[in-house]
Amino acid sequence: MSPEVVLALTYAAALTATAFGLEWLSAHTHRRALRFRTAGFTYEERHDHWVCPEGEQLWLHELDHERRLARYRARPRVCNACPKKHGCTDSDRGREIVRSLDPWPHSEAGRFHRALALMLVGLAALVLVVALARNHTPADSVPLVALLVAVALGGRWLVRDLRAHPANFPTPMRRSDG
């Protein structure tokens, strides 16, 4: 196997590993941030509300379709009288929890990181295709094709969710000429 092929294989594998590492890290960070914002609170999907550590329920207060967010709020009189208020919220309008309507990776941040990962996988595929075009011996072609197939399958997995769900951008308003 030629040194050029070894370098191409190594570089493509590193790009692909970086892409999936970025995908995992961004999803992990998203889950961790969500746990931090809702620490001690429990979401009850059946009734679509949150329950605070003191037993108060936070009901749906606002549904923002443009930003794709749901806001839940506790009753202000209950929060203001709570002995643990100083550790929970500084708002006099009650504790608020914001929940994304779109699961990861369909949020804006998730789509951004998924697109970055896809660009890295595409670059890895390009490196492999160029190396394959320059090296035609079976000893060089077999590992290049094998890794190219693996990269293509990884790219297919990454692109699946992007194609299946719209970007949730607001529809453009028509301009009236007149």
Image (spheres, rainbow, N blue to C red):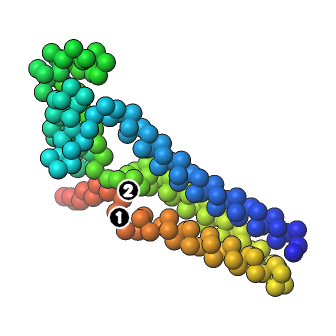
Report the side of 42 relative to 125 (left or right): left
Which is more toward the observer, 108 or 92? 92
Relative to 27, does residue 42 appear above or below in the rendering?
A: above
Please give the count of numbered marks on the rendered protein.
Answer: 2
**Residue 84: image location, x then y, percent:** 25, 17
Q: Amino acid at mark 1?
A: His
Residue at point 23%, 20% (across, down): 91
Q: Estimate the spatial distance between the alpha carbons at disc 2 and disc 1, rounded to whole Å.
A: 7 Å
Q: Position of residue 79 (x, y in %)?
A: 17, 21
Check the image and report above or below for 75 versus 85: below
SS under mark 2? loop
Q: Residues within 10 Å of mark 2 (few under 14, many from 20)?
A: many
Residue at image mark 1? 165
- Any mark on residue 112, and which? none
For this view, does 43 lie left or right of residue 1? left
Apparent side of residue 147 relative to residue 76 in the rendered image (left or right): right
**Please, what is the three-letter code of the amino acid marked with disc 2?**
His
- Which one is in front, 42 or 127? 42
State the residue position of label 2.
106
Q: Nearer the viewer, residue 19 or 35?
A: 35
Q: Residue 79, relative to residue 46: is it above or below?
A: above
- Residue 27 x, y percent position in the rendering: 47, 49
Q: Is residue 133 among the parts visible in the rendering? A: no
Q: Locate the N terminus and report the quarter of the image it occupies.
A: bottom right
Q: Are marks 2 and 1 in contact (CB under 8 Å)?
A: yes
Tag 1 secondary structure: loop
- Residue at 84% across / 84% down in the picture? 137
**Residue 60 seen from this side:** yes
